[in-house]
Image: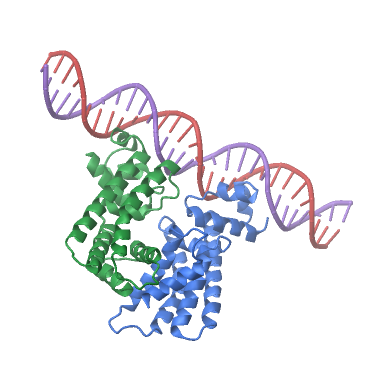
Chain colours: A green, B blue, C purple, D red
Amino acid sequence: MSRETLMAVSARLFARGGFDATSMRDIAGEAGMLAGSMYYHFSSKNDLIAAVYEEGVAEISAAVDAAVAAADTPWTRLEAACVAHLQSLLSDTAHAAVMTADLRRLDARLRRRLIAMRDAYERRFIDLVTALPLGTGTDRTLWRLQLLGALNWTPTWYRPGGKSPAAIARALVAALR
Amino acid sequence: MSRETLMAVSARLFARGGFDATSMRDIAGEAGMLAGSMYYHFSSKNDLIAAVYEEGVAEISAAVDAAVAAADTPWTRLEAACVAHLQSLLSDTAHAAVMTADLRRLDARLRRRLIAMRDAYERRFIDLVTALPLGTGTDRTLWRLQLLGALNWTPTWYRPGGKSPAAIARALVAALR
DNA sequence: TGATTTACCAAACAAGTGTTTGTTTGATAA
DNA sequence: TTATCAAACAAACACTTGTTTGGTAAATCA
């Protein structure tokens, strides 16, 4: 069982139940080993969390950057970013699904580290929103928080079978246009 | 220490850290008693959670109903509802703040019960959105989920000092108009 | 007055947590 | 064959969790 496989299992369980509620024994059981054996690959649970989260941020960043690069107007760039963002969040094979997990219970050092990663990622959206031709009275910070909030909330109600993640993301952007 | 005071303390701690991360000892300590003593007032932690959540739903329902009754056009009614909704969610004295807590880790029976309460509350927004004159192509279900998602996500970034919860709610509605 | 109820404490319980330790296994290379 | 290494197991560690039990002062009621 490789380190990468362990991280993939962890990402799925973390995304489903949060960090605190997912025990090392849960992960190990799913991966076919005992809890203690994981400490050969990761020096602590916090270490595992950080590794998974970092991989998630890297994944979603790459997906969004590629999508943005392929579009050529401010609105289509934002739309492409949102589609890539939501597809990553709702995929259950992607590590990025952990990014909607609750960070409050993590110890302060780790939490700050993860928040810094997330902020660095979300900075992309500041730029994308800045480039939009919005009404002069618009609070662009709030507008961006509204868009990301609606996107990040979708994992709580999304169920496969209806509109695709891409269609949802496009509709959310369109409604704010 | 009354049952009501205990519920108020619980609501604050549940809203800050979630149900799982808030222990009976945390609550008891804040209330000035020992963990075991709480079992005089509540037969189990799940019982306490259900009581707090129910009170929260009742509170926010009353606040929204009163706000809606005082407005007289579809858009102002929706706006009033969102203002009341967000004020309840962001108040740290209201029990309603627990409504954004994560329900996934609760046992199935309790989770279903809380979800049923929340659904009954949110049904108000189905009616409010139905009454709006939206473009014919608009998916009203998704439109409502977008609005509620943006509202329910605010507790993750809101900090007192900037725009008021009421102003935020009005801006979120305005951006979707 | 005496009996009962209210509201709590003190201490324990079993189960589950992350983590550490010593040991074993199978493969690989000298 | 010998030596080394990666990767795991088995069992314990100290600690936290929700919960239970038995007791006890103060208030209330008969």
Q: Quadrant of residue A127?
A: bottom left
B94 versus A60 height, above or below: below
Which residue appears at 33% of the width and 48% of the height? A117
Which residue is found at the position 47% from the left and 81% from the top? B76
Residue D1 is left or right of residue B17, and the answer is left
The front one of D13 and C2 is D13
Q: Quadrant of the C terminus of chain B?
A: bottom left
Q: Observer-nearest residue: B72 or A140? A: A140
Residue B36, percent from left and from top = 61, 47
With A80 as the anchor, is C16 left or right in this view? right
Q: Quadrant of residue A75?
A: bottom left
Q: Give how far across and how far down residue B34 sits, in percent.
A: 62, 46
The answer to whether residue B117 is visible is no
Q: Quadrant of the N terminus of chain B?
A: bottom right
| Up/down of B33 relative to B5, above or below | above
Residue A84 visible in the current orientation: yes
Say which of B108 and A96 sits in front.
Answer: A96
The answer to whether C13 is drawn above or below residue B46 in the figure is above
Q: Residue at x 55, y 82 (%)?
A: B70
Which residue of the protein is positioned furthest toward the front in this rendering? A136
Q: Position of residue B59 (x, y in %)?
A: 56, 70
* Residue in the foreground of this view, choosing between B43 and B72: B72
Residue at figure coordinates x 30%, y 66% from the top left: A159
User: Residue A162 location, x and y as percent?
Assistant: 26, 71
Is C5 left or right of B76, judged from the image as shown?
right
How many numbered marks, from 0 up? 0
